[in-house]
Amino acid sequence: MANIIVTEEDKLRNIVQEEVSKLLSAKQEVKTEIDTITLTKALALLSEYGYPMSKAKLYKLTASGNIPCRKFGQKLVFSRKDILSWAESRTRPKNDSSGIALTLARSARRKK
């Protein structure tokens, strides 16, 4: 059986306010992760999520403007969110038949 506590209304209100303020302050103290990363961390992040890439390839993509990045002084800076969404947009289904149909059409044109 649960313990029953008898108290006055004001004391109960104070107890509830203290507990709520503790919860709200703990929620505000949640540390937000910095979104910007360097080139080496971007390579590690891509590899961690299953998109392995060489440093040279990443440099080529940044030079051509095909991958979202910014410069801070002489350093390249990437956004975690942007680079992962870019990598996701570059993937295609394993059984993508559009590439097969295009290859067959090109092959048929050459045989004429």
Image (cartoon, rainbow, N blue to C red):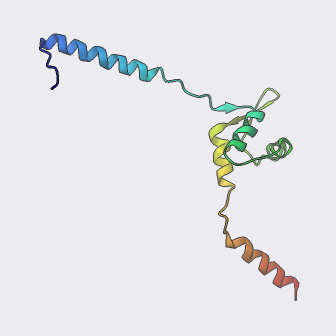
Q: In the rendered image, which quarter contains the N terminus?
A: top left
In the depicted structure, whether residue 77 falls above or below residue 9: below
In the rendered view, does 27 fall on the left or right side of 47? left
Q: Is residue 72 above or below residue 86?
A: above
Q: Quadrant of the rendered structure where residue 10 is?
A: top left
Q: Could you say where residue 37 lies in the image, as x and y percent from the top left?
A: 70, 32
Left-right relation of 4 to 75: left
Image side of residue 4 versus residue 91, left or right: left
Please provide percent x and percent y for residue 64: 82, 47
Q: Nearer the viewer, residue 51 or 110?
A: 51
Residue visible at 75% across and 39% down? 43
Q: Position of residue 84 (x, y in %)?
A: 65, 44
Q: Quadrant of the C terminus?
A: bottom right
Above or below: residue 44 compared with residue 110: above
Please identify the residue farthest to the bottom as the structure is shown: 112
Give the side of residue 44 with respect to residue 2, left or right. right
Q: 56 or 112, which is in the foreground?
A: 56
Q: Classify residue 23 by image quadrant.
A: top left
> How many numbered callouts?
0
Name which residue lies at 58% across and 28% down: 33
Residue sitting at x 67%, y 31%: 36
Residue closer to the observer: 109 or 26: 26
Q: Position of residue 111 (x, y in %)?
A: 88, 86
Quarter where residue 81 is shown: top right
